[in-house]
Image (tube, rainbow, N blue to C red):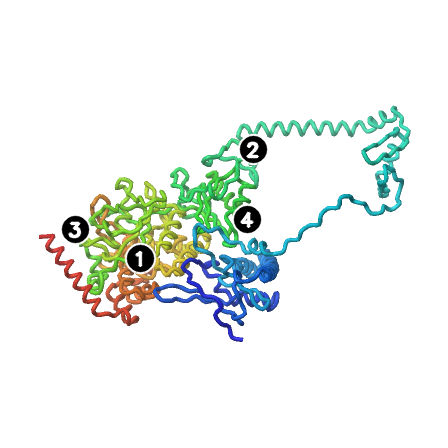
Amino acid sequence: MKSRELFKIKLENYRPLLWYGDTVFGRYASIKNLLGSQFGREFANVLAEPSVMDGENGVRYGVWYAENVEEYRSFDKLGPEEQEQAANQLSGILEKVTAFADQLLQSGETSHKQMGEILHLAFRVPGYESIYWGNGQVILVLWGFVSDELSKKSFSLRDALSRFRPQVTPPEPPTKVTPPPVPETGTTGITGDVKEPIVTPPPIPEKNKKINKNMEEHEKDIKITDETTTVTKDVKVKKASRWRLWWGKWWKRLLWILLALLLLLLLFFLLNNSRCGGSTGRDETTHISTNPVPGRDQDRSGDRDRQNPVPPVRREQIPETPLPINRDDVRPMPGDTLQRPIVGNRLNVIINRDNTIEEFLEDFNARYADQAQVVYCDTLANLLQVQFATDDIVVWKERLQKLTGVRMVFTEGVFGAEVIPDEPGFKDADESYYFKLIRAFQGWDVTMGKEDVVVAVIDNAFDLEHEELKGQCVNPWNIMTNSPDVNTYGGTQRHGTHVASLVVGAINGVGVSGIAPGCKVMPIQVGVEDGSMPTSAIIKGFLYALKQGVQVISISIGSNPREGTDQLPWDVQEQIGQTTFVEEGMFWNELYVYAEECGVLVVECAGNENILTVVDPMKRSDKVLYVGAVGVNAEPAWFSNFGKYVSICAPGMSIYNAIPDNKYDFLQGTSMSTPIVAGAAALLFSLGDDVKFTDVKEALVKTAIPLPGNGVRKQIGNLLQVDKAMAYLQKNNPLLADPCTRKIDSLEREIERLKKQLNQH
């Protein structure tokens, strides 16, 4: 029978669960086949067939299909009896599938473990709206999705179903318990009407008979009495014989006494040694801190201080703002040959989507609450950050990976702004050469941008009072202070101001403008006073931008491998990209996939170390538009990173634009190339409401022109051409080719040019 539409909903408030960069619902065929072969038709059909499609105005819809759809009703429309039936059936299915998934996870085969993970995620649903019932069959829609509301606690299907299952009421206990008849074995003492059995003891082992025989010869009259039973036995005992019995094995008892004394001496030595700061090694429960965790008493061993127990940390107590970086804690990861800087006393923990943060905290509190501290929580990313002693990062990574619900653990990287210092003759370049090289002026004949197109710039700091940025910014946010108060720390940090101005700098008669002056920028500050930016802050800034509904995210940030990395052979660099910081790379890719699901184009710098981009865990995804750099004559910049993921380039040497305090200067690096491409993307989005990020990405890459020698020495992509990208987009989307709109935009540009001329005179 043909499947028909059962359920349809806008996905603006729901987010698909991801498994290593792929959506879980996208594995529907594999999941259905596995359940059907293992359990039969009833289990195979419990998940409705999913489909995600684009509607009008860029709204995404999720549709779930099933057979006999007219027979199904949603859970809230069922009567109490039907709800109970549906809950019972679904509970039974869930119990068996969960047990089977756990069995797969314990398998030694990678493919089995993967399917176990997918099965757990597949039965994650956002609420009761996912349950349908009809013709004695339960079915789930919206499976593999979660609610995107920050404040909403994770929905547990198992707990929700337990509310509707019948509860068995235990019978009232009888007022008087009459014991069953007692077999006549041995002698019975009598008290009142109740008989107490005396059970005949089992046969005595041969090796114990000799000892028992000696004891029998020296017993005394004994009377044992309690409230219900009196047992009396007459036994003859000789006191002298008891004395001889004790001393009969005097030499054995002397050995036990000596052993006890030795144990006492050893215990005294260990206690005294621990007070002096000594250590006899580490295990999973012993830890002596060399770098105290804020707010924790470190004068203790790994065992819990029973006099002053550490109270368990609760979800509501954990800060939602990333901690600033303490430079004293920055060091390379042990074993990292590239010596990339990380925060040595913190780790980021990603919780499985089918687990809750509370489950992790319960396990963490039981094991390590007196040795480490949870210092940050991001509920949208399901991320927690744990802080501990600086020298124990490898040990703590192993510990945290074993806790309940942990999916992956990775370091808190220390990222820097990707900018190259000034060089001799740097200021000889034409201040606006990069506009000409990418044919931006010709693109402006079509449009200079629309103000409802917003580019999020994630960077270290911003001067929003600069004349190039005044009136050009929307919804600024400082991740490090959890407030809209972005700043430049007294003008010491100029990178973010320069980058933002390259995107949307105003046409105001001074300096130079941005590539898309008619659009808006959303400044997201993730840096501290020294310009460094932690991984957790960048992640939170990225998710903030997605929640605000921007069209483009521009990131001019990169890791800092040690000097000389560019001397490593390319195959060695490729191997480093495949084997180091793997979990962090996987998580970044999942964020980029999520951006695609939101219809957002991510533009990111390739980096400035003259190495393969894959060395940096942020730069290993085919979902991102990574940007290389060229010079004044369109030659590949000597510093630009390169590789298979770098698909486009733009000018990045001698780039003139705004810096704090209403000043201007030249900066260079792929940091400058990136906002130039992001600005071009904003112009393409401005062509019409029907433009999709996939259209923009394709137009930018396909119309870029090849460079002489590019790809021979290193692959940095072709050179951006703004006007050609616009023409390509309009040609492939007839709705965008509106000559009237193009003429109006051209006239507005001419008016702005004349105003600028008048201001100069």
Hey, which quadrant is residue 217 in on the image? Answer: top right
- Please tell me which of labels 4 and 2 falls first in the chain: 2
Callout 3: 10 Å neighbours few (<14), some, many (20+)?
Answer: few
Give the structural element (helix, strand or loop) at label 1.
Answer: strand
Give the structural element (helix, strand or loop) at label 2.
Answer: loop
Question: Residue type at mark 2?
Answer: Asp
Q: Is residue 743 depicted above or below 198 in this figure?
A: below
State the residue in front, 334 or 725.
Answer: 725
Question: Residue type at mark 3?
Answer: Val
Mark 3 touches mark 4? (CB < 8 Å): no
Q: Which residue is labeled 3 in the image?
A: 510
Q: Is residue 727 visible?
A: yes
Callout 2: 10 Å neighbours few (<14), some, many (20+)?
Answer: few
Q: Which residue is labeled 4 in the image?
A: 404
Gap between marks 4 and 2 measured at Cα: 24 Å
- Please tell me which of labels 4 and 1 falls first in the chain: 4
Please tell me which residue is depicted at 61% across the width and 60% down the height of the picture: 88
Report the residue that reaches farthest toward the left: 761
State the residue in front, 682 or 44.
Answer: 44
Q: Which residue is labeled 1 in the image?
A: 628
